[in-house]
Image: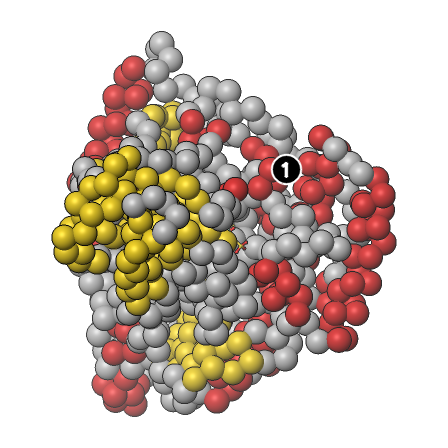
């Protein structure tokens, strides 16, 4: 609730001479994966004149951190002011519960006009906005499709420019009698870093320094640092990430390129042609190859940021021209930071500084002295409460963040927290960053990696800002460690995150049945990537009920078939009476993995002549939401057989309406069950 209603405010204004402050407009700008190292005024490696201007006219926060360094969870934390375990968005795979309390809803309730434009990524339809127009899922850089309350529409142009066009358009059309809050959220500079035509080749003549830790060997660190899959040299794709043709093996990349219109495509091809040609001819290996990849990566990443900065300039000019600059709070941040080659990495997720820390710049001339810098420990948890507070709306007591407003005037002098808390959950998953939680104080960081590991890391950020020397368990660190553990526990209690162990260790289900340990002959070999490494995976008596098991490439009780059917013949060793057969499969709707459309069981005494055939159609729609495992039970009465052949039909090609439409579909089979 506004502390004073607008009506009352107007009366008061009329009645007395003392002016009552107008509630400010708020523009919350969120970039995606924008590291501080890529912002000029943070001592970055590029130039960002407009962001620098924003900071010069406002306040730069030097120690702003996320609470769970990945996209959808970060957005949910910002909206709700609550840690992930309370707002329910633990990872990117879940769907945001839009029925809960969010700061835009509270602003709306207090008389603000609210709008959301750009990247959303929370799956459910946005709530709490008078107007919304969002990219679908991650969205595309070129000619993207936007969704609003009336449907979907594709627009010609570059995402960062379009998002700004739509934002300015909405500001222009708003009801001028009410204050507004606009969430203006970019896709850029998210992977795969496709710069706009105007910025292609802008860094062609520049060579960026390699980060000091580019060749990190992860000595002293836990297995979590070694077992990730986010190395520039090992895990980047030459085609989609590094834009090297001619071989386009990645379906998504083909889809991306095919979106470009002929003019965009000509500029694109021309920009990369000579360098790509030279690269192919040079046939680089080892360090030279890794360093080439780093240069290409960093240039495209920074090229994507150039548009974000240009468009910030457009927005600031617009506000000035329309006399909105004085009474509009502008907040610029990112969902989290990003690795720009530090430790050899790209992506985020880890609580290491490069990903954990993000830019935060706030401009509000009425309360902030131009050019101030704040080094208090703040988090994205605080953004919602800050906006509410600036709008004169009470911050609900169940929000866990704190308003930054006291810091805006006093640049860190206010009574403030001494430590921040972090908890990351998305594992097993793309990039394989293990689950961990931790605490960061002014000087130290303590992290605990758990789930399929139980390992700690401790850093002295003052002596070791690059976090290379894990002090955990070293002699002399006992009391520091005990003290930090105590503070960490206190934070977990304060934030009500005491049940982390519920997330510990995924277990495999075991089932003793007739086929366990019996040989299986496959007609089509499983695809290398998801071979599971063991020929007996389908009859090992082990399977996962856990939804997300397929992400873990190391666990080996299932096999994957790429566009092909599974055709498996089990030999029970001798003729056995059979009462039931089934195939356990894995699926997740948002991914490329689908249930078989049907499963047929054949029975034989000699493995050659099959005397009985039972087909079961799958009635689960291929695009069904959520994730699950699924059996195909078949009641078999009084049937005796030695051989059972299971044929599961792969849907083949991802269907229309799926983001992988037209690409090969996977079928993941876990266990052939015979009872
Ligand atoms: C995609 C990216 C990953 C990235 C996640 C999450 N791969 O899967 O590199 O970590 O999104 O990013 S890509 O080849 O499809 O680009 S997030 O910002 O949405 O959390
Ligand atoms: Ca992100």
Question: Label 1: how many residues lie within 10 Å, few (<14), some (14-19) or many (20+)?
Answer: many
Is residue 368 left or right of 672 when viewed as pictured?
Answer: right
Q: Is residue 158 visible?
A: no
The x, y position of residue 596, in whole percent, is 37, 60
Q: Quadrant of residue 81?
A: bottom left
- The relative height of residue 562 versus residue 100 in the rendered view (above or below) is above
Question: What residue appears at the point 33 percent right and 70 percent down from the top-left corner?
Answer: 621
Tell me residue 91's x, y (percent).
35, 52
- For the point 21% across and 34% down, which residue is it? 489
Give the residue displayed 46% in from the left and 74% down from the top. 657
184 vs 24, left or right, is: right
Q: Give the quarter of the figure containing the N terminus.
A: bottom left
Secondary structure under tag 1 reads helix
Q: Nearer the viewer, residue 309 or 18?
A: 309
Residue 476, above or below 145 = above
Is 129 rendered above or below residue 173? above
Residue 215 shows in this picture: yes
Q: Which residue is mark 1?
A: 233
Q: Quadrant of the C terminus?
A: top left
Which sits in the foreground, 182 or 293?
Answer: 293
Image location of residue 315, percent across then percent down: 57, 73
Residue drawn 75% across and 61% down? 200
């Amino acid at each position: 609730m506004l502390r004073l209603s607008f009506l009352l405010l107007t009366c008061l204004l009329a009645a007395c001479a003392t002016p009552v402050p107008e509630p400010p407009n708020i523009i919350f700008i969120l970039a995606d994966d924008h590291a501080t190292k890529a912002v000029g005024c943070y001592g970055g490696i590029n130039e960002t004149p407009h962001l620098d201007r924003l900071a010069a006219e406002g306040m730069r926060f030097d120690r702003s951190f996320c609470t769970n360094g990945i996209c959808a969870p970060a957005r949910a934390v910002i909206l709700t002011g609550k840690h992930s375990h309370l707002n329910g968005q633990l990872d990117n795979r879940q769907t945001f519960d839009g029925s809960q309390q969010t700061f835009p809803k509270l602003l709306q309730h207090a008389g603000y006009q609210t709008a959301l434009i750009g990247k959303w990524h929370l799956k459910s339809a946005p709530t709490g906005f008078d107007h919304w127009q969002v990219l679908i899922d991650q969205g595309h850089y070129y000619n993207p499709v936007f969704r609003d309350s009336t449907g979907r529409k594709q627009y010609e142009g570059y995402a960062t420019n379009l998002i700004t066009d739509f934002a300015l358009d909405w500001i222009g059309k708003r009801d001028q009698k009410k204050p507004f809050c606009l969430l203006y959220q970019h896709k850029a500079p998210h992977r795969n870093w496709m710069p706009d035509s105007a910025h292609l080749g802008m860094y062609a003549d520049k060579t960026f320094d390699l980060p000091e830790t580019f060749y990190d060997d992860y000595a002293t660190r836990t297995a979590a640092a070694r077992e990730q899959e986010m190395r520039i040299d090992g895990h980047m794709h030459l085609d989609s990430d590094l834009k090297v043709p001619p071989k386009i093996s990645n379906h998504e990349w083909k889809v991306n390129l095919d979106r470009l219109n002929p003019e965009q495509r000509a500029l694109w091809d021309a920009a990369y042609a000579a360098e790509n040609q030279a690269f192919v001819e040079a046939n680089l290996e080892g360090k030279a190859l890794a360093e080439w990849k780093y240069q290409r990566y960093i240039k495209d990443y920074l090229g994507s940021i150039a548009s974000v900065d240009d468009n910030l300039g457009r927005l600031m000019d617009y506000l000035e021209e329309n006399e909105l600059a004085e009474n509009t709070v502008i907040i610029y941040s990112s969902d989290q930071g990003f690795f720009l080659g530090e430790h050899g990495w790209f992506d985020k997720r880890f609580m290491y500084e490069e990903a954990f820390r993000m830019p935060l710049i706030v401009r509000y001339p009425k309360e902030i002295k131009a050019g101030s810098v704040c080094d208090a420990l703040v988090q994205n948890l605080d953004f919602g409460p800050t906006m509410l507070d600036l709008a004169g709306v009470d911050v609900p007591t169940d929000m866990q963040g704190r308003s930054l407003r006291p810091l805006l005037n006093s640049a860190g002098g206010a009574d403030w927290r001494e430590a921040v808390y972090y908890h990351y959950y998305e594992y097993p998953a793309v990039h394989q960053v293990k689950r961990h939680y931790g605490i960061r104080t002014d000087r130290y960081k303590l992290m605990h990696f758990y789930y399929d590991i139980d390992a700690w890391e401790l850093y002295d950020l003052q002596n070791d800002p690059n976090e290379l020397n894990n002090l955990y368990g070293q002699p002399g660190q006992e009391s520091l460690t005990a003290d930090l553990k105590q503070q960490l526990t206190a934070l977990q209690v304060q934030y009500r995150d005491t049940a982390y162990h519920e997330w510990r260790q995924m277990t495999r289900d075991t089932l003793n049945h007739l086929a366990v340990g019996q040989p299986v002959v496959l007609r089509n070999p499983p695809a290398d990537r998801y071979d599971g490494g063991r020929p007996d995976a389908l009859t090992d008596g082990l399977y996962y009920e856990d939804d997300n098991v397929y992400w873990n490439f190391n666990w080996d009780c299932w096999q994957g078939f790429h566009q092909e059917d599974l055709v498996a013949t089990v030999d029970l060793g001798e003729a056995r009476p059979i009462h039931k057969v089934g195939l356990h499969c894995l699926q997740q709707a948002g991914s490329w993995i689908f249930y078989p459309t049907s499963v047929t069981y054949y029975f034989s005494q000699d493995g050659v002549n099959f005397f009985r055939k039972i087909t079961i159609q799958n009635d689960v729609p291929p695009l069904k939401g959520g994730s699950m495992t699924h059996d195909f039970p078949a009641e078999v009465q009084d049937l005796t057989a030695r051989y059972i052949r299971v044929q599961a039909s792969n849907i083949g090609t991802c269907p229309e309406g799926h983001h992988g439409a037209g690409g090969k579909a996977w079928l993941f089979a876990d266990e052939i069950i015979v009872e």
